[in-house]
Image (tube, rainbow, N blue to C red):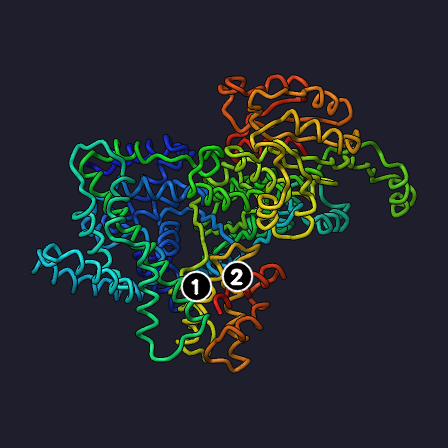
Amino acid sequence: MTNAFASVAQVRDGLKKINYLADDGIAGVVYLAQRLGKPVLIEGPAGTGKTQLAKSVAELTGARLIRLQCYEGLDESKALYEWNYKKQLLRIQADKASDSWSEVHDDIFSNEFLLTRPLLEAISAPDPVVLLIDEVDRVEVETEALLLEVLSEYQVSIPELGTITAKQIPMVFLTSNNTRELSEALKRRCLYLHVDYPDMEREKEIVLAKVPDISANLADQIARIVRSIRQLDLKKAPSVSETLDWARTLILLGVDHIDAEQAKETLHVLLKYQTDIAKAAKELSVDE
Amino acid sequence: MPVIDLMSGFVGELRRAGLPVSLTENLDAMEAVKVIPIEDREAFKYALGATLVKNSSHWRVFETIFEVYFSLRGSQYNIVDPSEEQADEFWRDEQDQAQLGQGEGRGAGGGGLEALTPEELANMLMRALMQGDQAMMRALARQSVARFAGMEPGRPVGGTYYLYRTLRNLDLDNMLAKLMEAGKASSQRETTSLEQRLAKDEYEMRIEQFKKEVEAEIRRRLVADRGAEAMAKTLRKPLPEDVEFMHASREEMQSLKKALFPLTRKLAARLARKRRHGRKGPLDFRNTVRHSLSYGGVPAEPKFKYPRPAKPELMVVADISGSVAAFARFTLMLVYAIQSQFSKVRSFVFIDGIDEVTKHFRATEDIQEAIHKVNTEADVVWVDGHSDYGHAFEVFWERYGKDINPKTTVLLLGDARNNYHASQSWVVKEMRKHARHVYWLNPEPRSYWNTGDSIVGEYGGHTDGVYECRNLRQLEGFVEKLV
């Protein structure tokens, strides 16, 4: 790849320039992934910037992002490739008389009639690409097997055409919300990165970077309160994206110093369960 | 020692700790080590982590072993430490500069800290905690270990003993209150309750961080004394899913609780999926004919009936006396977290009396709160508050026996240590006659069964199976089987 990283620090600084604040772990794994040519499996709670990482790396390396959104019932015709059946039919009907059978047969199973899907597209792309396989935990265990050949050998076998091998090794990111245990085979082929909620300092930086016109003071307060809330025993802890929403809400309301009352009134931006909101409101206004 | 030898010892220890490290992963780690120099310890740790640890709940174990094996290598091991791992880079830069300044100062007057009186040391610690001065905290942690832990080479004492000694001398328990006082005094105006709360969280975190520093320092010294292999062995702790319910420490309980929630989510997702993707049933004639209309009456697309297995009704009858209480709590939590997989869940708790606690779970969405209510409000003591399975079962049968029907699955939880009371095992026999299944879950190791006053065999003979449920892994396995 042309834009190879030279060091971990370079990855981190590069990501920072495009407003993605990576910690040492994230930057280290991205660097390692590129050097070893291995896919990265990113796990972690929702809303901590897993998908964003892939996008940011694509932006940083100037590569094209190819995204495969996983869902239940995803199959190889949606993930790998599919024969363009209608076009094949037209081809056969177009010159019924002239061609012999064997010619037609060879002809209709050529590249022209192949519809590439994200995985094959990433493999056969001539330009640098970043492949993002999003929410891989949503597909069934059996479907995971489709990914294995692509992830370990960077090739796709098509019975009619032979094996298509990657012209260059793309960077691959898989994200998972951890709703089920992924298979050992898949995990073994990947580098593993657990992205958790950022610590307070990093969260503050993120708020400062992503929310325009916010004062350092307010960002600091927001990060502190969010940290305290995350320590509570909640159904769903606030994610980074919810922190950002909250920060924007407070800006819109013209708040520059949060007191307990304002915090309580805007908690619903941060928390999505009634029981959680009640609990947090109670905790934040203790010892009156 | 060359890196490769070190690595094989390290990977061996990971495997002994229960982490599933495969050969390919080991090779990947070797590749990674080539790319990332060992001197950059933080990046090195993440490189190993990314290649060897594929489950976030194993990270803590990995980290401990890493500390043991690599804490003495790398020139700047004293700059980085676990509590700092997610630090933002700006902040880190500042830290490093501060560290440099500190280092020079300390280098020049190395005896500076050692010459302090204990009072001065305590004051310095308080100041460092107050300002969140990382470098100072680290230096103080080192100093306090040297001074208070009383470590002697070759002494066969675990790290916890030294930790306890050090922390006791520092009086950290009162530190929080003192910090809060000082914080209040130093601010000019009246602080609001919210601000106080936030300050308290901040100080608590710093104290926690300081404790970690002390712990890491003790570990470093122990490793230097005894060698990495021996140390790793004494530090070996079970993975969260292997922690035994009956012997879990408070800290382990905490991590168990944390592990339980994602586990239930996974379990629920898996069970729901299993239910939907059951094997295909017989041909659905009506549906096939309906779909044949779009093919001009040709039944080109056969449709099948999907079997819809009825969801079981569940009755959980749990012993909540002393040692097995934790187990009962976890099972109830797990069952209620996936209650959508059952058509109805009723729960009963007993010691020597029995009480139905279903209403507590129904009243609130918060399982923790419900469990708390069960512990405080359930009427479970009949005579003396010692387990009496016989009496509890008898009363259960009298009051609720008629509610058991062929759809019901009954779960009996407990160690069946009956204090030599009458067993009344006929109740279990009757249950089995009326219910779909009766299972017994026992949190004791199988080898303890039927020893002393345990009469699990006597009850077990009348059930559809007695299962050993000592840890989350076994509990999860059983619940999956149940649905």
Task: Pinpoint residue A69: horizontal percent, then vertical percent.
Answer: 59, 53
Q: Hey, which residue is sitting farthest bottom in the picture?
A: A254
Mark 1: which amino acid?
Gly
Q: Is residue A120 visible?
A: no
Residue B449 on image: x %, y %: 53, 20
Does label 2 or label 1 sit earlier along the sequence? Answer: 1
Q: Position of residue A99 (x, y in %)?
A: 71, 44
Front residue (pair A65, A104) = A65
Q: Which of these two is toward me, A193 or A285?
A: A285
Q: Which mark is residue A238?
A: 2
Residue at the spot 65% in from the left edge and 39% down from the top edge? B271
Where residue B456 sits, quadrant-wise, is: top right
Number of labels in the image equals 2
The C terminus of chain B lies in which quarter of the figure?
A: top right
**At x 92% / y 43%, what residue is drawn?**
B297
* Residue holding disc 1: A62
Compute the Cα span from label 2 to label 1: 32 Å
